[in-house]
Amino acid sequence: MRYSSLSLLRQGLAGHEGWPQAWRSPDLKPSYDAVVIGGGGHGLACAYYLAKVHGIRRVAVLERGWIGGGNTGRNTTIVRSNYFFPESVALFDFALRQYEQLSEELNYNIMLSQRGIMNIGHSDHQMEMMARNVNAMLVNGIDVELLDAQQVRSELPMANFSPDARYPIMGGFTQRRGGVARHDAVAWGYARAADALGVDIVQNCEVRDFRIEGGRVVGLETSLGPVSAGAFGLSASGHNGVLAKKAGFRLPLTSYALQAMVSEPIKPVLDTVAMSWATGMYVSQSDKGELVFGAGLDLYPSYAQRGNLPVTQGVVAGMLEIFPLFRGLRMLRQWAGIVDVPWDYSPILGPSPVGNLHLNTGWGTGGFKATPAGGYFLAHSMATGGHHPISAPFDISRFHTGAFIDEAAGAGISH
Amino acid sequence: MLLIPCPWCGPRDEPEFSFGGEPVARPVPAERVSDAEWADYLYFRDNDKGPHTEIWCHSGGCGQWFVMERDTLTHAVLSARKPGGAA
């Protein structure tokens, strides 16, 4: 069924009891042309692009839990492409441009809200870094604007502009095309569109081992039995390293817990995404009215999907320092997702060291915004056996050649 | 909050410590180490889920480095010891 105002009206008049299933729950078949490991937004997008762009319809997505239940449902829903290096801009702006027309393409409202993302600078040094970054971004064709303190104040009047502020606000820069999108809807929209093209989405299916013959992956052992295919895609975010070891190689990644949290809902007060360079804290307000916020990693390896109190306290303190008016709010929920962080904070894409297995790994703390790109370029690698020009600089070989795309240093702050 | 047993100072709270990575052995001699071996030493890690051997520093305390076994899934601290033959 095509979703539209008319279908909503019809179904509404019929008591909303006639909506068809959005995607099937098929049994795992013994063989496919392509199998994607990981049913988050990236994996589902990959399956969709395999079917749509490459005409490969015998595709399965294997998800250990439920689709979109990992980091797709755990991020802070921010989309943006304000990166430093041209390689990163090509990658992340590709994703943002896909997001800009994705609701129409998938016939599924992903609730993209391009409310802008405001980076706040608190010192002369940060303002110099911002000017440098903005210049680089403008050269790369990204819509960013450097703002002085008065301009920031006109857009964020509730921020802490008091003369005795611990972190005085001296300016900032904004990307107006940045914003937020409904993360669940991205997974569900891709799932529904992929299913309509014949893709099997198999949930509660854990990949336990790889069957490797002559240096190539020929099949998987799963909790639902064996499956073989001509190409495999690895797209399991924090667990990519665990799965890679089962396939016989290691990745230059460390898995950390990244926390996020929401306050109780309040009336609309914050109409952009705000990010402070002093505290690393970012905050936006959801459509339900909750403040959604987070900051840095718990800086030791973790698969626990929960962060620890010291970082939680630091995140909350950082937000209250910049937005003291939120001091009286109660916290509703706190959680963490496990993110696979590479040394240069740029993803690792394309063919893996083992034949037939392709990588969509290392998105670290910034995976949601890249969902369409991760899916698109993994599909390209699986279908063609090689890189798309945009994903080529992100090949794993850069860890041997030293040709890093060092956004950890370039962007000046983790994301 | 992790309660970390520093081998020199005894149990202290997590914010006093810094994670320093997985223990790795530097390949030698340098002139015979290939690019692949060097990259493996610098960047490629086990990143295990479950029991995991790690180097930590009591950076906000005695400043000493030590080896800790920790479960990355449960966050349980399994053991901590002084590195090498340190007394």
Image (cartoon, rainbow, N blue to C red):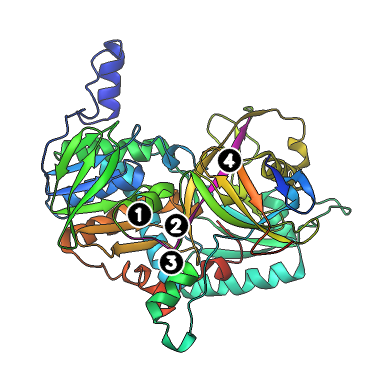
SS class, disc 1 = helix
Amino acid of disc 4:
His
Please give the range of residues in magenta: A249-263
* Residue A255 highlighted magenta (yes or no): yes
Amino acid of disc 3:
Val
Amino acid of disc 1:
Lys
Check disc 3 and report the residue beneath it.
A89
Picture residue at 69% right of the left edge, 56% below the top: A152
Q: CA distance from mark 4 to mark 3?
A: 37 Å
Amino acid of disc 2:
Asp
Q: CA distance from mark 2 to mark 3?
A: 30 Å
- Same chain assignment for discs 2 and 1: no
Mark 2 chain? B
Q: CA distance from mark 4 to mark 1?
A: 21 Å
Picture residue at 62% right of the left edge, 42% below the top: B77
Check disc 1 and report the residue beneath it.
A245
Q: Residue B43: x, y in percent?
A: 47, 68
Q: Residue A349: x, y in percent?
A: 33, 62
- Same chain assignment for discs 2 and 3: no
Picture residue at 55% right of the left edge, 56% below the top: A415
Check disc 4 and report the residue beneath it.
B75
Picture residue at 66% right of the left edge, 61% below the top: A172
The residue carrying pointer 4 sits among few (fewer than 14), some (14 to 19) or many (20 or more) residues within 10 Å by Cα, namely some
Left or right? Give the position of A287 relative to A119.
left
Q: Residue furthest right?
A: A164
Q: Earlier in the sequence, mark 2 or mark 4?
A: 2
Which circle marks residue B46 in the picture? 2
